[in-house]
Amino acid sequence: MTTPLNRIGVFTSGGDAPGMNACIRAVVRRAISEGLEVVGVRRGFAGMIDGDFVEMDRQSVSNVLQKGGTILKSARSQPFQRDPEARARAAARLREAGVDALVGVGGDGTFQGMSCLHDEHGVPVVGCPGTIDNDLFGTDETIGYDSALNTALDAIDKIRDTADAHERLFLVEVMGRDTGFIALACGIGGGAELVLIPEMMTDEAKVREKILSLMSSQSRSSIVVVAEGDEVGGAHRLAESLRADPGCAHIDTRVTVLGHVQRGGPPTARDRVLASRLGNAAVEALLEGHANVMVGVVNGDIKLTPLKLAWSRKKEIDYDLLNLTALLS
Ligand code: F6P
């Protein structure tokens, strides 16, 4: 790296995820322990463009490790991806604030913006994967995924009780606009009879057939987990199509959309540890002169992946797990 590292910026962007605060804390504390100064950028790229910066010290990240959300706030800044002038303004604000390098916690949109800042304005950037969707290449898990998964699982366990009591079919929609990581894992963990995810073609006629056979069997209660991005068009859409089918219309069907409840709440122990490791690794990467990379954990070890690869390459779901749902239901 050409510029000496004295002062780093840290920000969160995109959909918030439990564990983001633990990551900010790790970045701030590790950086300060190395004699660096830390500037917090508030409201993601939107705040970067406006120069909404705050000085951070050890005390400013006290008592945040266990909290969901993000103390630096977050935003979805569409103009940033499309508007080179917005990026030039953000780079100028960073320069004015004396920021030598930037750590960003977020998902693919965040990393795309950071890649642009690096490529167009030479800002040394390191990304920490933070999204409940777990859809970033270069890390086995993203910060927030485990917490969201456990929130969804807790809900499914509760739904199971009432589904069983009333012998009903429940269609439970979980987050995942483009990916089925949450759906698949909470489907297995919650013993769902069927899981629908964007990565697998969904044949609606076959789904109705399967549901009919499930509901005619002895148990007479079933849970179908639907990822919001599945081509079936969400749990409400699937319920409509079941009610419209004379063969399935008699099935007592209920829909639960878990929605943003999955994004909130305290991070699990697993997420706190992951976030702390990744925040620390991000500062370490900068100190070692790396830039334009994402820090991730692969098979238990910290690994650096070129930032562009992290957001552009599709992370594969585990198809064995999908087969397992079918096998065990
Ligand atoms: O954080 C990722 C994600 O949870 C997606 O799965 C979901 O579609 C999206 O965020 C919705 O977020 P928002 O309401 O903030 O646009």
Image: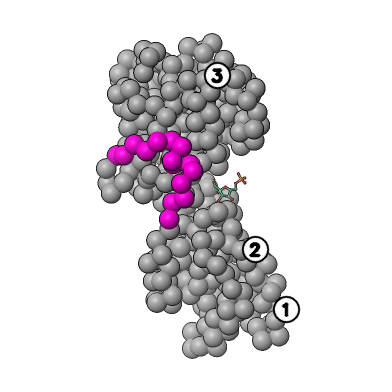
Residue 186 falls in which quadrant of the image?
bottom left
Residue found at x 46% / y 57%: 181
State the residue in front, 258 or 177.
177
Instruction: Decide: few, some or many residues near mark 2? Use Cα within 10 Å; few <14, some 14-19, many ≥20.
Output: few
- Residue 266 in sight in this render: no
Task: Find residue 138 and report its horizontal and vertical position in percent.
Answer: 38, 44
Q: CA distance from mark 3 to mark 1?
A: 55 Å
Residue 223 on image: x %, y %: 52, 72
Q: Are marks 2 and 3 in contact (CB under 8 Å)?
A: no
Residue 233 is tagged as 2
Residue designated by label 1: 244
Q: Disc number at residue 91?
A: 3
Mark positioned earlier in the residue sequence (3 or 1): 3
How many residues crowd mark 3 within 10 Å: few (<14), some (14–19), many (20+)?
many
Quadrant of the snapshot with the N terminus: top left
Count of picture labels? 3
The residue nearer to you, when weighing 102 against 159, is 102
